[in-house]
Image (cartoon, rainbow, N blue to C red):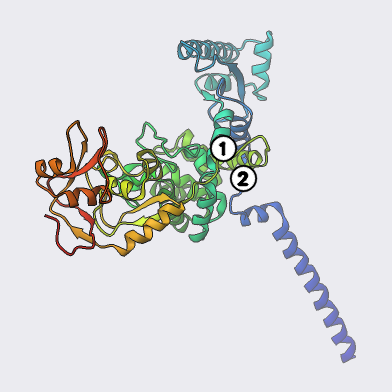
């Protein structure tokens, strides 16, 4: 009897275990649970928006204008074929085409909203976009028409440009413990254009404003690291990581990149989660751009990955560079002369440096890391520079163009310096001759660091 009871108990426990395990497995394998585990969930409520932006990025080009409902992106009234933007007077012509199409749609919605039975092809097509066909719905929609220019061609150009940066961006994000999918965010922000700037004063690949950027980068009259694609990537990684730590998931953290962390914290306090915020939150500046930012990101990821596998898309290749940290204030002219780098190359590799530094009017500050071409010649000279020492000079540099009759000795006398110092500043050997039109670095007022030669005597 005891054995029989024990047997029943064991059997019952076994079946209970099987049932419990099955229920747990079913719960965690349902779409909702799977969605909860996905770092970048495509919630059902945002799927029409994601689909809309996939069309904007992957179907409609910049010569097509989409007139759609601002709130319900399933409602696309028409797609206008525009005149090429390069054609003379195109802006005026396209503006008229858009205005005419918008007015026609508004007239139809006004008529339907006042009880007109749809009879024309255009009226029937627009009426079919509103299943409930309530008069008030038509009248509300009349004031809710939005214009969106297609981005297909520009997006493809962005994918081409991204080849130069995205590999390094993924590596940087991995260092911060971030999902590499975040590396596709610049497709939404700047189309991977490091020189991009907005009307709101946002600059660079990651579109940092001055106020936000200063928390992570150097931004002043001489250096703007927002324009350096990789320095700004480190800044973006830090900001995204902070957003995630505060908000707890990526839909909120990514939206905060556009709307601001504290704004999203207020939205969460009121609406609790992302789907509710998307559906209901309307306070402050949380308008169309912020509401759609996460949807745009998901769409951009999908379209970009498809294009990356398109054999007709030839992505730009990364440029090989070597970092060089300055241990003293240094003129860019001295750097370029020493490493034999053109003005254009140095400027391209160091986009954060502004005009005074690139022209050698002001020295690049100590501690700054410049990028140099990763060539055999540069690497060899880099080692020579490392073995040298900086010595403080009593002079600032200025640029001088060699004129007829100039010589090193006459210039040394005129600028109260020595031939040796001019040669040092310009990386000239003992037998070098100057030529008409040649640019030379000459001492001015102030103080910078220059390379010390074998002599321990301080430059005079």
Q: Is residue 293 visible?
A: no
Residue at the farthest top position: 120
Tally the numbered discs. 2
Could one spot residue 399 in this view of the protein?
yes
Quadrant of the frame with the N terminus: bottom right
Q: Secondary structure at mark 1?
A: helix
Percent from the top left, x then y, of residue 78?
A: 61, 18
* Closest to the observer, 282 or 86: 86
The numbered disc on residue 43 is: 2
- Residue 219: x and y in percent read 30, 46
Vertical relation: 41 (above or below) 292: below
Furthest residue toward bottom: 2
In-front residue for pair 383/288: 383
Say whether disc 2 or disc 1 marks the residue closer to the N-terminus.
Answer: 2
Q: Residue at x 41, y 40 (%)?
A: 204
Give the side of residue 451 with respect to residue 129, left or right: left
Residue labelled with disc 1: 160
- Viewer-nearest of discs 2 and 1: 1
Name the spot of residue 69 as percent of width and height, x first.
56, 25
Query: On residue 108, which mark appears?
Result: none
Mark 1 Cα-neighbour bin, 10 Å: few <14, some 14–19, many ≥20: many
SS state under label 2:
loop
Q: Can you name the residue that lies furthest to the front here? A: 431
């Amino acid at each position: 009897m005891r054995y029989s009871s024990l047997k029943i108990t064991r059997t019952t426990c076994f079946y209970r275990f099987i049932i419990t395990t099955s229920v747990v497995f079913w719960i965690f394998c349902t779409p909702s649970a799977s969605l909860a585990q996905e770092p970048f969930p495509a919630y059902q409520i945002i799927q029409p928006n994601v689909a809309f932006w996939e069309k904007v990025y992957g179907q409609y080009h910049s010569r097509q204008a989409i007139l759609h409902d601002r709130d319900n992106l399933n409602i696309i009234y028409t797609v206008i074929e525009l005149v090429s933007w390069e054609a003379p007077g195109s802006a005026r012509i396209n503006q008229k085409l858009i205005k005419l199409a918008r007015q026609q749609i508004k007239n139809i919605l006004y008529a339907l909203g006042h009880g007109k039975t749809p009879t024309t092809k255009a009226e029937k097509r627009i009426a079919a976009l509103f299943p409930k066909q309530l008069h008030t719905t038509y009248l509300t929609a009349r004031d809710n028409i939005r214009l969106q220019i297609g981005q297909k061609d520009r997006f493809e150009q962005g994918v081409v440009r991204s080849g130069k940066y995205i590999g390094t961006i993924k590596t940087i994000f991995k260092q911060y413990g971030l999902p590499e999918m975040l590396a596709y965010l610049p497709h939404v922000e700047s189309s991977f254009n490091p020189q991009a700037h907005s009307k709101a004063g946002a600059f660079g690949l990651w579109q940092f404003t001055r106020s936000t950027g200063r928390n992570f980068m150097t931004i002043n009259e001489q250096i703007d690291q927002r324009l350096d694609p990789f320095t700004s990537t480190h800044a973006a990684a830090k900001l995204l990581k902070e957003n995630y730590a505060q908000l707890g998931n990526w839909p909120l953290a990514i939206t905060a990149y556009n709307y601001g962390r504290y704004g999203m914290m207020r939205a969460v306090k009121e609406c609790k989660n992302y789907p509710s915020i998307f559906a209901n939150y309307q306070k402050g500046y949380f308008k169309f751009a912020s509401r759609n930012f996460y949807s745009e990101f998901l769409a951009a990821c999908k379209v970009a990955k498809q294009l990356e596998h398109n054999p007709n898309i030839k992505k730009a290749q990364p440029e090989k560079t070597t970092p060089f940290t300055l241990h003293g204030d240094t003129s860019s002219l001295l750097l370029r002369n020493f490493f034999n780098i053109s003005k254009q190359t140095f400027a391209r590799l160091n986009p954060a440096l502004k005009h005074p530094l690139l022209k050698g009017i002001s020295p690049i500050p100590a501690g700054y890391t410049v990028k140099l071409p990763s060539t055999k010649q540069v690497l060899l000279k880099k080692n020579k520079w490392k073995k040298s020492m900086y010595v403080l000079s009593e002079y600032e540099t200025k640029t001088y163009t060699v004129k007829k009759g100039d010589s090193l000795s006459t210039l040394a006398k005129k600028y109260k310096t020595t031939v040796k110092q001019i040669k040092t500043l310009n990386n000239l050997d003992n037998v070098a001759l100057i030529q008409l039109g040649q640019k030379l670095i000459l001492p001015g007022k102030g103080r910078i660091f220059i390379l010390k030669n074998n002599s321990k005597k301080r430059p005079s």
